[in-house]
Image: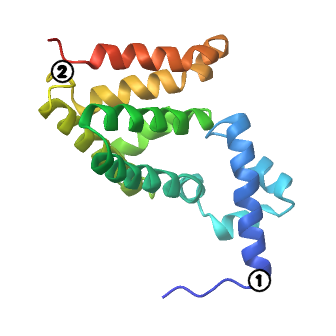
Amino acid sequence: MTRALRADAQRNRERILDVAAAVVAEEGTQASLRDIARRAEVGMGTLYRHFATREELLEALLGGRFDRLADRAEVLRDARPPGEALAAWLREFASGVAVYRGLAASLVATLEDDTTSLHASCARMRAAGADLLRRAQESGDVRPDVDGTDLFALFSGVASIADTAPSLAARRDHLLELVMDGLAARR
């Protein structure tokens, strides 16, 4: 059973998360924890009391986002035809990955390491996307030789294009459409 945080400790935690969101958006998932603590105006000890590791901080920052994407897949699955549901979800996934520099690489590492605290949220999100993919394949909208790994590699790569080639960031949506066209079943 976890104890409720004192009011000042709760404020510190929320300030750390707010600052971490901004710093990670600016500098990427490997941003300096020291910089986060300094900008949040807390000591390193305070940061580590709330988040013992970088992964715990990323889990607090990103876990909810991944859970919401998994939930969103269920809503889209019930509200739209399979191909449309997958396309809409993939756009939302790509937009989320693009928010934080370095997130695509962190996602890949998280999926391969089931000991991280972020793994469960990431795996749930990936399973939800794979379910949408399977349904789109069954309906004939998506080619049958695509698997979940292909899907996440392609969309993570395009979503993170600004990390490696900032001049292409404005073309991200166009590139996502090209990938969707490549996924379409040949008729």
* First of labels 2, 1 by sequence position: 1
Q: Residues within 10 Å of mark 1 (few under 14, many from 20)?
A: few
Q: Secondary structure at mark 2?
A: loop
Query: Where does residue 3 sit, x and y in percent of width and height?
Result: 59, 88
- For the residues labelled 2 and 1, the Cα–Cα distance comes to 53 Å
- Report the side of 137 relative to 62 (left or right): left
Q: Quadrant of residue 5?
A: bottom right
> What label sits on residue 143 in the rendered view?
2
Q: In terms of depth relative to the viewer, which is nearer, 72 or 165?
A: 72
Whether residues under marks 2 and 1 lie with C-beta atoms below 8 angstroms apart, the answer is no
Amino acid at circle 2? Arg
Q: Quadrant of the C terminus?
A: top left
Q: Is residue 45 left or right of residue 150?
A: right
Q: Amino acid at mark 1?
A: Ala
Is residue 2 visible from the viewing direction of this image?
Answer: yes
Residue 144 at x, y percent in the picture: 14, 24
Q: Is residue 1 left or right of residue 3?
A: left
Note whether 8 is above or below 98 in the view shown: below
Residue for point 68% across, 42% down: 24
Q: Residue placed at 65% from the left, 36% from the top? A: 28
Examine the rendering and report whether any part of residue 32 can be seen: no
* Badge 2: residue crowd in 10 Å (few <14, some 14–19, many ≥20): some
Helix, strand or loop status at disc 1: helix
The residue at 75%/77% (across/down) is 9
Where residue 166 sits in the image (x, y, percent)? 66, 16
Mark 1 lies on residue:
7
Q: Is 99 or 88 nearer to us in this picture? A: 88
Pair 2/1: label in front: 2
Which residue does the image show at 36% across and 43% down from the upper left?
111
